[in-house]
Amino acid sequence: MDTRTSTTRLRIERVRDALRAAGAHAALVPSADPHLSEYLPERWQGRQWASGFTGSMGTLVVTLDRAAIFADSRYWSQAERELAGSGVELVKIQSAVQPAHLDWIAEQLAPGQILAVDGQVLGLASAGMLRAAMQHVGIELRTDIDVVQSAWDGRPGLPEGRIYEHLPPQAVVSRAEKLALVRAAMARVGASHHFVSTVDDVAWLLNLRGADVDYNPVFLAHVLLDGQKVQLFVNEGKISAELQARLALDGVQLGRYADAPAALAALPADAVLLLDPRRVTLGLREAVPEGVRVVEQINPSTLAKSRKTMAEAEFVRQAMAEDGAAMCEFYARFEAALARGEKLSELTVDEWLSAERAKRPGFVGLSFPVIAGYNANGAMPHYRATPESYAWIEGDGLLLIDSGGQYLGGTTDITRVWPIGKITAAHKRDYTLVLKGMIGLSEAVFPRGTLSPMLDALARLPLWQAGLDYGHGTGHGVGYFMNVHEGPQSISKAVPDAHMAMEPGMITSNEPGLYRAGQWGVRIENLVLNKPFNTAEGNQFGEMLAFETLTLCPIDTRCIDISLMRVDEIDWLNSYHSVVRERLSPLLSGAALAWLNERTEAI
């Protein structure tokens, strides 16, 4: 490729042309949309369009003579490959929340120069940090300039997929009950109105689902509610007349998607508006009249949807069993094909595993793209094979498969690592240390209200004791037929806040890992449910919680170095495999059942 005329170089130059036309000197392009979503509709994938970097997280900064992507260790190998020859630099940061780009911008621009960022996709909390940092060095911040819009010819429009209702029996809590819960929370802080912009909160609150964002059953919308009515701002034509009538029974009125800022601007002077500063953009906040009092607190729906009811948890258990059965069907077929000497690739894994999930009752779609990474590709946590770039599964090594499904009764996310051919003692040592960390966290007992980041060290301890670590979080919240990544809890090195308190009903991933760049990667992941833990001491020392492991799929024992395992760890694994066999056997037959029985043999 002639890098002088590469697509990325040409697009970066178009961004610079837009900067010059606006009289600005640098552009900040975050990975965000007007809802601050993690996974973005194509219209707001400006960072990817301009830079060519396809990672799900990252920040692009373009000046008149330099361009840089800021990405954490999960994406370094991927970014180096995708940015090669583009003229866009990779700046390696240690954490996704590290604001290293602020210092970089301050070094590139002179006092009095202008930094442009689209305020419609800039989070309110991030905007405060950005404004303070730029004021400190005398750089002017302009949030009314969208250089992506100016530079991107043929920029996609809004998604047009239809919105549908999440219905009983899986929709356990009614729309009216959820609205009453949120209104009660509004009343406790004296709010007359509440604005909700995050798409998963909107979908949860109204028991609606959509397909505007790949792999997430959500849709683009804002909600403004008061004590009597709800205004749902969506693109026209997305809701049928029948569904509109059912929504009206709960006081839900439709408005045009583009009219949400105007509705905020029309709030009465005596209104008290509840807003979540971490879940609304600067542009929407600026639409609120100055006279309206704003209460800044977490969205009540964010806390409520993280705590699954007992009935929802039972549907999740059923979804996990169906998902586990699909995994067994796939692995039985896959291993048999390898044994016959068939030529298989990472793309085969994606195709066959997705096909098995599609056969299961209640399946709606994948919860994220299948990650199948063989050997060196497994060392990239967010790797994805494509027809242009993939590996054949041949020779010796480790195959990492991270995948999940969306079911009417729950969302799944599971990672397993499998030996291909002959594996080494080094492979087994890495695998066993990761497994020990996963078991250590699985066995945790902790007081209710423990801040989730405090649990992170339990999964890292066996790796730390060997001088090893991994660059991503250990656990993220998971939705109920919703986004596979959900807050507020996070088992990670994040600075904890009060909203990360662990409560009964929360579902969180447990996924420690270890990655050796250019060699192999190991990650073992189950989803776990917070449940009450009864002790002989009763409640004298407060309510205690423990984890129920929800994921049902064998953990390969051929990769284990038994000499590194304690007796209690072996007991945990044997007990887990006993449950997996008991739960999945009724759903399987033939080769898949035989495979399950073999892989769940006690050690």
Image (cartoon, rainbow, N blue to C red):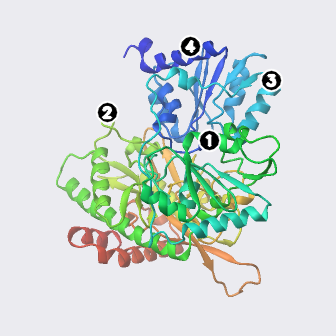
Q: Residue 180: x percent and y percent?
A: 65, 68
Check disc 2 and give the amino acid type. Answer: Glu
Q: Which residue is mark 1?
A: 96
Per the image, the residue denoted by label 2 is 388
Depth order, front residue of 497/292: 292
Q: Nearer the viewer, residue 546 or 420?
A: 546
With respect to residue 109, does 168 lie above or below? below
Q: Is residue 423 left or right of residue 343?
A: right
Q: Earlier in the sequence, mark 3 or mark 4?
A: 4
Q: Nearer the viewer, mark 3 or mark 4?
A: 4
Q: Earlier in the sequence, mark 3 or mark 2?
A: 3
Q: Secondary structure at mark 4?
A: helix
* Residue underneath mark 4: 17
Whole-percent x and y of residue 182?
Answer: 67, 63
- In this view, 42 is above or below 548: above
Circle 3 sits in a helix, a strand or a loop, which is it?
helix
Q: Between residue 434 and residue 312, name the one nearer to us.
A: 312
Instruction: Evaluate whether residue 463 shows in this view.
Output: yes
The amino acid type of the residue labelled 1 equals Ala
Residue behind mark 3: 137
Residue at 61% over, 48% down: 197
Q: Which mark is nearer the camera, 3 or 1?
A: 3
Is the Cβ of the residue at disc 3 closer than 8 Å to that at disc 4?
A: no
Kindly report the distance in space between the C-alpha atoms of the residues bearing marks 3 and 2: 44 Å
Closer mark to the observer between disc 4 and disc 1: 4
